[in-house]
Amino acid sequence: MEDELTALEKLNKDDNNGEEGKVFNFDFYEYKSVIYTALFYAFGLFIGSYFYKISATETLNELLRPQEHSLANLFISNFCIYFSLYVLVVFLGFCLIGYPIINIIPTVIGLVTGLRASYLFINYSVKGIGYSLIMLIPFAALFLTVIAFTINESTSLSKELISITKNTNEHNELNLKPYVKKYLILALCILITSFVNACLTSLLFTVVTI
């Protein structure tokens, strides 16, 4: 009897371990595009930082120099840039060839962030580092997080579209409602991020001048 109970406990333990492994593998597969987004962003960050160090010019400095604007102008500028990249990611999700090229977006974000961070560090020393830590890095990370989850959804959608085109089953249909709902939530996050960034940037310019 004891041998039977021991065997049963061992069997249940093996089953539980198998389920845990499946959950772990599923989670990694589900969010591996987020990991790829972070890696491509880091690559862009490195390239941007290195590029500025070897090719800094007055023209480039003028483009990277923070400009003081009104709250409304800052918000509109932020929203136009953030939302344009967001829409591009969503568009690539509906495009059958979007999956291989969608990670260009976090690379571009990393490139621009690296350029700006290097400009501030080289030209303004401690003040530039403080500005980067307060304004540049946190909002780049926040925006990248939104873009990462948008890419995750768009990658899933792109793969599903490819799967449907290869499947000849006429009953195989694409349900867009879950995607639309998540896209709307992410768009709202873009709006909030743009507004908060504009508010804090406007406030910072009243305290610190760059």
Image: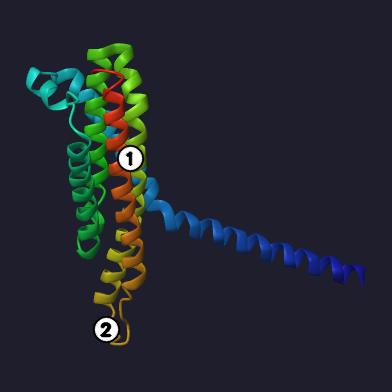
Viewer-side residue, 57 vs 47: 57
In which image quadrant can residue 209 be found? top left
Residue located at (86% from left, 71% from top):
4
Q: Position of residue 38 (x, y in %)?
A: 36, 42
- Quarter of the image that includes the C terminus: top left
Q: Is residue 133 above or below residue 188?
A: above
User: Can you see residue 132?
Assistant: yes
Residue located at (36% from left, 26% from top):
134
Residue located at (29% from left, 79% from top):
167
Residue located at (22% from left, 45% from top):
79
In which image quadrant can residue 90 be found? bottom left
Label 2 packing within 10 angstroms: few (<14), some (14-19), many (20+): few
Given the current orientation, which residue lies at the most extreme bottom position?
170
Circle 2 is placed at which residue position?
A: 168
Q: Earlier in the sequence, mark 2 or mark 1?
A: 2
Viewer-side residue, 200 vs 92: 200
The circle on residue 196 is 1
User: Can you see residue 147?
Assistant: no
Viewer-side residue, 152 vs 65: 65
